């Protein structure tokens, strides 16, 4: 029997990669602004938003393929059916990439002239940059199908190392290109296009290596839409929820990109990017537990599946919860250390606070989705996303237009709090009543409330305005480590582990 990849190794590899990629991306941003200028960085933020909106073309097929890959490795799908599905999806992805990328290319001049508030950059350069964005985004999106295969196969250690290498080429390598050819948007995005091509080629090769060997399949694979039909209900539900996710996480950015000047929009995206580190901290855990839960459900190991689910929740609360509260309550000092700009830090700190806490609520309220994903039953998740659309999108648009980024931040935090404390509990009662109260009170609040209280005490203990950047950073890092340590000690499994280690030392 094939040995399953270690869940702990996958989570550790994911975290190492995500911390490196996120840390590199965040630390390098002030250099982009310094060498390229605020408006050019606004284009970088617009590029990141386009990549998120492009996921609307996915139609739920990438996570569906990841789940089918996990089912194949769990013995619940044949090599032939998997290969037929992969071929069908590959054709659909390429066609969608041409449609989406071509549409963005065609409307590049309209976006530059009528949507973005460009003040100092040459409009021709902005149009060219958007056209290059169109091709790069399309290529990166196609590579998602092969990421799905790798994720579903739980080859996350390899994928994590690969992501770190690609991030180095994107974030650091671009400075070599710009030092040779100029610190302009055109050079920046041409470099990103080249890296997107390299990324697609390598992911394709790895995906083909993991997929069942075509030579061992005796029947012709062919091409037909029929394999997609068998998973269409699941994928369309995923498509709807993925679309809602894009609307939920990107609608404020889309609205504000047309309201704020390109330079001001760049500063807004800077603050939101810092808050997005909370989302990234949960990513390695969700990427690791989702295929494992799908496999356990296929193997009828329901108790083990719920154990993985609850342990994953606690780990996210401990790590992401600590980081979110530290970002929220030390927001001004963190931005000042990062950018060195007193005025920017003063204005952006409130945005960082609201989005940090809102993102924490978001990633925790997403956990019931993982449970439904594993079971292949997304009805309640579909309902929750309908409610999300009805409530969030109009409010985001109204308050972003009326009050700018601060208004969008308040809506973001409030709506996600509702889904965490009320909707997630409702879904648990419907799917797994035995863990409904335990999940909210023991796995979430029992850790979250002490973290909140400790950060408040630590943030008010010293007045950091009297100290320079090095001391501020040291105290902020110290505060984060204290909160994590306390949260770990509160967790009963950590206490049992430490007690057993200590007892072993005494009697060894």
Image (spheres, helix red, strand yellow):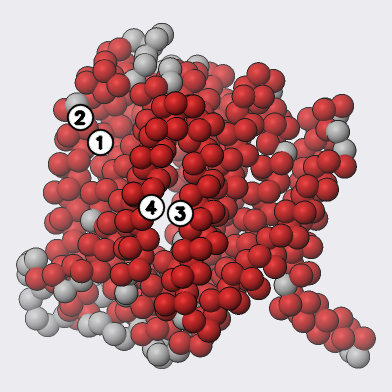
**Alpha-carbon neighbours of circle 1 within 10 Å: few (<14), some, or many (≥20)?**
many
Residue at 29%, 73% in the rendered image: 68
Q: Is residue 138 above or below residue 279?
A: above
**Alpha-carbon neighbours of circle 2 within 10 Å: few (<14), some, or many (≥20)?**
many
* Residues at marks 3 and 2, CA–CA distance in whole angstroms: 29 Å
Query: What residue does disc 4 label?
Result: 388
Quarter of the picture containing the N terminus is bottom left
The label nearer to you, 1 versus 4, is 4
Quarter of the picture containing the C terminus is bottom right
Secondary structure, mark 1, is helix
Secondary structure, mark 2, is helix
Q: Position of residue 304 (x, y in %)?
A: 51, 85
Position of 350 with respect to 481 (left or right) is: left
| Mark with earlier residue (2, 1) | 2
Q: Is residue 143 above or below residue 136?
A: below
Residue 47 visible, this orientation: no
| Mark with earlier residue (3, 4) | 3
Q: Nearer the viewer, residue 462 or 289?
A: 462
* Residues at marks 1 and 3, CA–CA distance in whole angstroms: 22 Å
| Mark with earlier residue (4, 2) | 2
Residue at 65%, 26% in the rendered image: 345
Query: What residue does disc 3 label?
Result: 162
């Amino acid at each position: 029997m094939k040995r399953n990849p270690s869940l702990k190794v996958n989570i550790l590899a994911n975290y190492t990669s995500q911390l490196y990629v996120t840390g590199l991306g965040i630390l390098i941003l002030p250099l982009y602004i310094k060498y390229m200028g605020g408006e050019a960085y606004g284009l970088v933020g617009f590029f990141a938003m386009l990549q998120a909106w492009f996921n609307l073309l996915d139609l739920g097929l990438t996570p569906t393929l990841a789940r089918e890959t996990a089912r194949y490795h769990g013995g619940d799908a044949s090599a032939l059916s998997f290969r037929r599905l992969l071929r069908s999806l590959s054709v659909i992805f390429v066609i969608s990439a041409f449609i989406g990328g071509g549409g963005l290319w065609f409307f590049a001049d309209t976006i530059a002239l009528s949507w973005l508030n460009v003040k100092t950059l040459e409009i021709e350069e902005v149009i060219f940059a958007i056209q290059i964005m169109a091709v790069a985004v399309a290529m990166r999106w196609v590579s998602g199908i092969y990421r799905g295969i790798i994720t579903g196969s739980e080859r996350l250690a390899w994928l994590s190392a690969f992501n770190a290498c690609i991030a180095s080429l994107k974030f650091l390598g671009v400075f070599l290109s710009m030092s040779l050819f100029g610190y302009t948007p055109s050079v920046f995005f041409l470099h990103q296009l080249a890296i997107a091509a390299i990324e697609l080629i390598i992911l394709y090769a790895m995906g083909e290596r993991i997929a069942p060997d075509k030579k061992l399949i005796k029947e012709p694979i062919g091409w037909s839409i029929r394999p997609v039909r068998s998973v269409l209900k699941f994928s369309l539900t995923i498509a709807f929820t993925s679309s809602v996710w894009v609307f939920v996480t990107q609608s404020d950015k889309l609205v504000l990109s047309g309201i704020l000047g390109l330079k001001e929009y760049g500063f807004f995206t800077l603050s939101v990017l810092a808050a997005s580190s909370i989302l990234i901290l949960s990513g390695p855990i969700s990427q690791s537990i989702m295929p494992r839960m799908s496999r356990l459900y296929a193997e009828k190991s329901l108790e083990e599946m719920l154990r993985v689910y609850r342990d994953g929740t606690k780990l996210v609360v401990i790590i992401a919860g600590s980081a979110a509260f530290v970002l929220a309550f030390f927001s001004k000092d963190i931005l000042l250390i990062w950018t060195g700009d007193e005025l920017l830090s003063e204005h952006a700190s409130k945005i960082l606070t609201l989005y940090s806490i809102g993102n924490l609520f978001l990633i925790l309220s997403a956990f019931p989705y993982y449970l439904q994903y594993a079971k292949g039953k997304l009805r309640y998740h579909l309902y929750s996303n309908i409610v999300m659309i009805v409530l969030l999108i109009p409010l985001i648009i109204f308050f972003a237009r009326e009050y700018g980024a601060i208004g969008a931040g308040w809506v973001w935090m409030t709506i996600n709090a509702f889904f965490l404390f009320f909707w997630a509990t409702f879904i648990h009662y419907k799917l797994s009543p035995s863990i409904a109260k335990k999940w909210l009170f023991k796995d979430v609040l029992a850790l979250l409330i002490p973290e909140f209280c400790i950060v408040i005490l630590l943030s008010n203990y010293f007045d950091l305005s009297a100290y320079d950047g090095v001391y501020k950073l040291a105290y902020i890092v110290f505060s984060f480590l204290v909160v994590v340590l306390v949260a770990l000690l509160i967790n009963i499994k950590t206490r049992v582990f430490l007690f057993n280690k200590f007892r072993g030392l005494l009697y060894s």
